[in-house]
Image (tube, grey):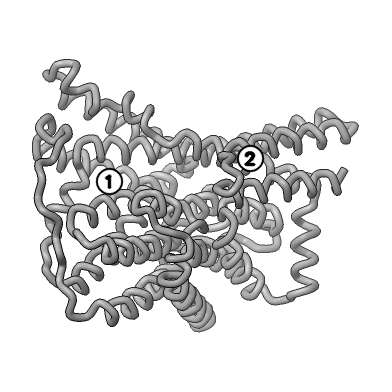
Amino acid sequence: MLTALIIIFVIAYAAIAFEHLLKVNKTASALIGAGLLWSIYAMSTGDHHLVNVQLGESLMSTAQIVFFLMGAMTIVEVVDAHNGFDVITRRINTKSLVSLLWLIGIVTFFLSAVLDNLTTTIVMISLIKKLLNKQDDRLFFAGIIVISANAGGAWSPIGDVTTTMLWIGGQITALAIMKGVFLASAVNMVVPLAITSWFLKGKKVVSPARSEEHGHSDTTTPFEQNLMFTMGLGILVCVPIFKAVTHLPPFMGILFGLGIIWLTGELIHSKKDDEAREHLTLARALKQIDMSSIIFFIGILLAVSTLEHTHILTNLAAWFNRTVGREDVIVAIIGMVSAIVDNVPLVAASMGMYSLAEYPPDSFLWEFMAYCTGTGGSILIIGSAAGVAAMGLEKIHFFWYVKRISGLALIGYFCGIAVYITQYRLMH
């Protein structure tokens, strides 16, 4: 049975990693993998009651992550529908390409900590299309946005889905991850920015010709834009505080906040006709969120949980410890592997490999893993959701990214590792 489970998981994982070559959506591979793994486990085990109990436990932990993601993505969609992100874009006005690069990098870094790296990448690449006319400049900026978004997501409990998984799973706490990983993440962003600035020194911003914006901006007032932007970010920022005060899971906080912003939207648009308010409603925002990604998380998390319940992951961790021996090297390798394969199943597998009894919350292993898996995906453009989004939005070729951006991301990755390990040793 164990051999069959490993073979099926490896095949499903390979299908996820090479979805672009196979032209098969990774969600399908994850769901088929999960279905086969649980079916084989159920039929091979005599104790069907135990299997159902274990499946119930796995479903409960998976549902917490899924509900949280659905709530957060919906709030972001509502803010975007109200043109709330124009609050940021209107304030960017510089003629120096280097100044703009630092401004975009820093805004991306902090915005992804509050929203998430995928959403921030989409927002910031949409922004540079309005600010830069030359495609070469936009491609470089897109690469820096990917690095900055992943770095910003790594130090925040709500900035990257893998950090969120560790936070909801109890491996890290909000304040500790922010204090512990912020400096390493900042270095991960600053080093590539500094190197790129040297190449772009003296260049001027070439803006595209202004064209009339078509959209729904005429149906939202500046008050509505500012209100929804402030409320959306405020709710996301308050989720860790909600968890600390009530000791309820984060998904409860995000759903509570979703209800508040939904009620606010209904009240401020109550006097508009149906056509004017249709695109601003929460009901429409729920239809706009990426359900394919959410179902992918369900599939991959349930697939990984079978390896956890059959102790395959525990045995793998023991083998790693015997062979490599050093935690920092093991986690650094996991981070680099996340550049090739999706970091969600990697972190899910790691959570099953190492127990909280042996590695308590906020220990070196979990914080370092949040940093490595969050930022390691920047090394290749297919290694993170932010990279894949940038690839689609700016038509970035895989090998262009390897030649121009991968080296920068790799230098930033190892500089951040050096900073985190030094900081940890000084503080502990």
* Secondary structure under the numbered disc 2 in the rendered image: helix
Quarter of the rendering containing residue 47: top right
Q: Which residue is mark 2?
A: 30
From the viewer's perspective, is residue 323 above or below residue 67? below
Q: Position of residue 43 (x, y in %)?
A: 85, 31
From the viewer's perspective, is residue 197 above or below residue 168? below
Question: Residue drawn 43% across and 66% down?
Answer: 400
Q: Position of residue 325 (x, y in %)?
A: 74, 76
Question: Residue drawn 41% across and 64% down?
Answer: 151
Q: Amino acid at mark 2?
A: Ala
Judging depth in this view, the residue of 392 and 88 nearest the camera is 392
Looking at the image, is mark 2 or mark 1 nearer the viewer?
2
Q: Position of residue 265 (x, y in %)?
A: 22, 28
Question: Residue drawn 15% across and 43% down?
Answer: 226
* Secondary structure under the numbered disc 1 in the rendered image: helix
CA distance for labels 2 and 1: 34 Å
Judging depth in this view, the residue of 300 and 355 nearest the camera is 300
Decide which of tag 2 and tag 1 comes sooner along the chain: 2
Q: Amino acid at mark 1?
A: Gly
Q: Judge left or right: residue 258 versus residue 408.
A: left
| Res 342 label | none
